[in-house]
Image (cartoon, rainbow, N blue to C red):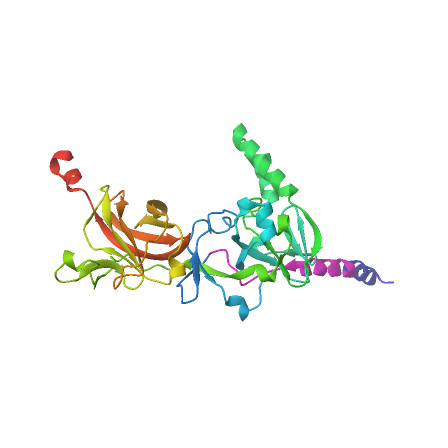
Amino acid sequence: MSPLRKLMLLITPLLAFLAGCQEERLSDPVTQPAVTTVKAESGHLVTRFRLDGMDGHASYLNQELVIDPDYYSSHSLQRGEVVYLNYPDNLVEQYPTIGKTNILRVIALEGETVEIRKSVVYINGNKLEAFYGRPPGPGLEELKDQDRASALPDNDQNNLRLRIRNYESMNLASTRIPSGSVFLLGDNRGRSADSMSIGAVTLEHIQGKVLGYLHKHEWEVSPTFHVPTPDPADDPNNSLQLRGEQGMLAIVDQPLIARKAYQNFWFFWGQEVALKGKLEIIGVKQGNERNRHTVFAAGGVSEPIKGTADGHIPPSNMTIPEPGLWRLEAYIKDKYFGSIVVDVQANSIETAPWTK
C-alpha cells in the first residue's frame, strides 16, 4: 500500500469525526436577545411580572409586556419564543410563592430529548448554540480563567467561585418531552420555577406568546377633552375638562406642582371585568424610565358615574416628587390599563431667588 493511501486511511476517519462534531450543534438564527417594542392591539393582554426568572439575557422584570393570547391558535410553538403560561392548580397549591402565571422560554418541543450538562443545553444530543442555550454572562471556562488570573478581594473571589459551582452543578439527565408538552426554562437559571423543577408543561397551560415590550405614546402632554359634569349644580355649563385618553383613562385638568399633595378624580372607561381589582398608579419621569414611583394606590375602582365614566376614584392624595414630564401609568390587578402624560411644575417657593 502506497504511503499516500495509508495517509488517506488515517485522515478519512478524522475528517468524518470532525464533520460529525460540526453536525452536533443546534442554532437559532431567528431569536435575538433584544426584546422588540410593539403596540398593543385589540385582544392583546398587557401585563408585567415581578418575578425575576426571565431577568437575564434581557430584562423582563417589571416591564409592560404585550401578550397575544390567540397566537398559538394559528401558529406552532417555536424554540426560543417566550410564552405566557399558567401553572397547574396542584403546583400552585404545593408552591404558593411561584404565583399562578409566569413567562418562560421554549427550549425543547414535544418528541425531542433535552439534556443539561454543566448549565449548557443539548437537544437530541446536539449542543444548543443559541444565546439561551446557557446562562447569561461569561461561560464556565471564562469564569474559571477569571478565577485563576485575578487577585480579587475575598468576598468577590468567593462570589466568583460560587458562580462556578452553580454553573457546574446545573445538570439534567436526558429526558424525552412527552406528546402535547414543552420544556421551558427561565433565562435567569436558579431563580425560575421552570421545567428543571416542575417538569415539562402541557400545551393547555400555554396561554399566549410574549410579543415584546409595550410601545407607549411619545412624551407629549396628554390632550384635554370635555365630559358632562357629575353634578350639574357644580358647573352651570354642565361640562368638565379632563386630561388623558378619551374613552380609557383621564383626570380632571388642573395644574400639578411637584411635592405637593394632589387631590382629584380619576375616571375610567371599559368593561366591568377590566375595572375590577387593586389599582396602582406608577409615575415615570421622562429621561429616567427605570426609576419608577408608586404615586397612588387603591383597593379598586369605584362604581360608574352615570353619563360620565364607567368607573372612578374619588379625590385622594397623590404626590409627584420632581418637576418635569411624567407618565402616570394605571395598573388594575397588575395589568396595564393606560397612561396619561402630565407636565409637573416646580414649586414656586423653591424656585424663588431668595431660596437659592
Residue 15 is a magenta residue: yes
Residue 223 location, quadrant: bottom left
Q: Is residue 300 left or right of residue 250?
A: right
Query: Can the viewer see residue 138?
Result: no
Q: Residue 170 at x, y = what percent?
A: 64, 44
Q: Which one is in front, 295 or 234? A: 234
> Looking at the image, is 100 positioned above or below residue 309?
above
Q: In the image, what residue occupies the spot 70% across and 61% down? A: 19
Circle count? 0
Q: Residue 307 at x, y = what percent?
A: 25, 64
Q: Residue 138 at x, y = what percent?
A: 55, 45
Q: Which one is in front, 26 or 6? A: 26
Residue 348 is a magenta residue: no
Q: Is residue 324 left or right of residue 238?
A: right
Quadrant of image for the C terminus: top left
Residue occupying the far right of the picture:
1
Q: In the image, what residue occupies the spot 17% across and 38% down? A: 350
Q: Which residues lie in the magenta part?
A: 12-34
Residue occupying the far top of the picture:
154
Query: Can the viewer see residue 308?
Result: yes
Residue occupying the far bottom of the picture:
74
Q: Which one is in front, 336 or 60? A: 336
